[in-house]
């Protein structure tokens, strides 16, 4: 197994991409701390799936937009599993609106949840990983952070910010044995994309060379790779998982 005995924290792991990551890491032997915002039933289902994969899980309900909650997430993971080897900053939200109609609170909510959280969690996890001189941090960006998207100035700014943060942290932490990479999914079938109108989905699909939307498992495989020793010589990179949409 690729991650035998490793301790991982996956934020936003109750549903969608985060759940697929939690389960895939568990299948490879990692113990998983499952963070989520409020959906207790979905989180319990992820926990059951991790356990069915033969590993251990704990549930950590916490708002990653809250600075103190981020510090506690890292503390609680390390307290439960003895360390933190892998951090996957996956939690994310959308609050879409055209620029002129976007409310300040919608801009701030997306920046706080999708970007500021990555700063707080990465800083807290890096402190522990530096002591072990080893660690893996994988941040969830989006192709929207690379190419932009009408109606998503807040989300695109946050996801572009995640890429800048990833590269800077990778440079700072490389000498301590910690790699920091980002994954940039395209159009993946989750609750986040289920709300898109059919016409928008069809337009997107027609642009994807591999002619299908992604499955959360497609993203989980990329995260697993970057979290494993197989990616020991890769840091500061952005891996697009998008069916070839952006190349
Ligand atoms: P999703 O299905 O909407 O699930 C979001 C997850 O994040 C849930 O587990 C949710 O917890 C959690 N969450 C939301 N706000 C949180 C907060 N403040 N604190 C802690 N957890 C929070 O989303 P998804 O599609 O799987 O997306 C996962 C990540 O991939 C996000 O960063 C997203 O931006 C990125 N992404 C997605 C796509 C796509 O096409 N789906 C494309 C590119 C990038 P609850 O269940 O408790 O609400």
Image (cartoon, rainbow, N blue to C red):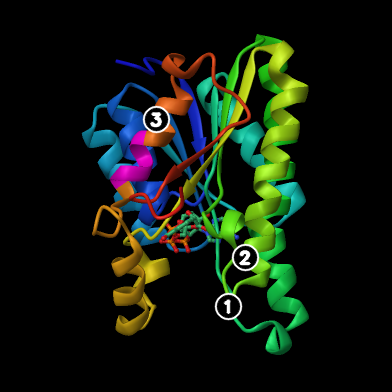
Q: Are marks 1 and 3 in contact (CB under 8 Å)?
A: no
Q: Residues under labels 3 and 2: Cα distance?
A: 24 Å
Q: Are marks 2 and 1 in contact (CB under 8 Å)?
A: yes
Residue 7: x %, y % from top left = 48, 24
Under circle 3, the secondary element is: helix
Image-quadrant location for residue 49 = top left
Q: Which residue is mark 3?
A: 224
Under circle 2, the secondary element is: helix
Q: Is mark 2 within 8 Å of ligand 1?
A: yes
**Earlier residue among tags 3 and 2:** 2
Position of residue 106 in the picture relative to residue 212 (left or right): right
Dot in front, 3 or 2: 2
Nearer to the camera, 204 or 112:
204
Residue 71 visible in the displayed image: no
Tell me the number on the disc at residue 96. Answer: 1
Which residue is rendered at x = 38% and y = 51% of the image? 242
Q: Is residue 246 above or below residue 231?
A: below
Residue 106: x %, y % from top left = 68, 76
Please report the bounds of the magenta region as a residue range. Answer: 217-221
């Amino acid at each position: 197994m690729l991650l035998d005995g490793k301790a991982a924290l996956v934020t936003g792991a109750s549903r969608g991409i985060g759940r697929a990551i939690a389960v895939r890491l568990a299948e490879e032997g990692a113990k998983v701390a499952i963070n989520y915002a409020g959906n207790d039933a979905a989180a319990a289902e992820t926990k059951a799936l991790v356990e069915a994969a033969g590993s251990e899980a704990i549930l950590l309900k916490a708002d990653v937009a809250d600075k103190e909650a981020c510090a506690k997430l890292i503390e609680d993971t390390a307290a439960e599993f003895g360390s933190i080897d892998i951090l996957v900053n996956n939690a994310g939200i959308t609050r879409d609106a055209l620029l002129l109609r976007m409310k300040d609170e919608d801009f701030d909510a997306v920046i706080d949840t999708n970007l500021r959280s990555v700063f707080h969690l990465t800083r807290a996890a890096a402190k522990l990983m530096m002591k072990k001189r080893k660690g893996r941090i994988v941040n969830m960006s989006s192709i929207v952070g690379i190419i932009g998207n009408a109606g998503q100035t807040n989300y695109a700014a946050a996801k572009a910010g995640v890429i800048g943060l990833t590269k800077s942290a990778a440079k700072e932490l490389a000498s301590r044995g910690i790699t920091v990479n980002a994954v940039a999914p395209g159009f993946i079938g989750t609750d986040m994309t289920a709300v898109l109108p059919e016409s928008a989905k069809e337009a997107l699909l027609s642009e994807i060379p591999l002619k299908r939307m992604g499955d959360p498992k497609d993203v989980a495989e990329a995260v697993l790779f970057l979290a494993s020793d197989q990616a020991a010589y890769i840091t500061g990179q952005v891996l697009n998982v998008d069916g070839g949409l952006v190349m």
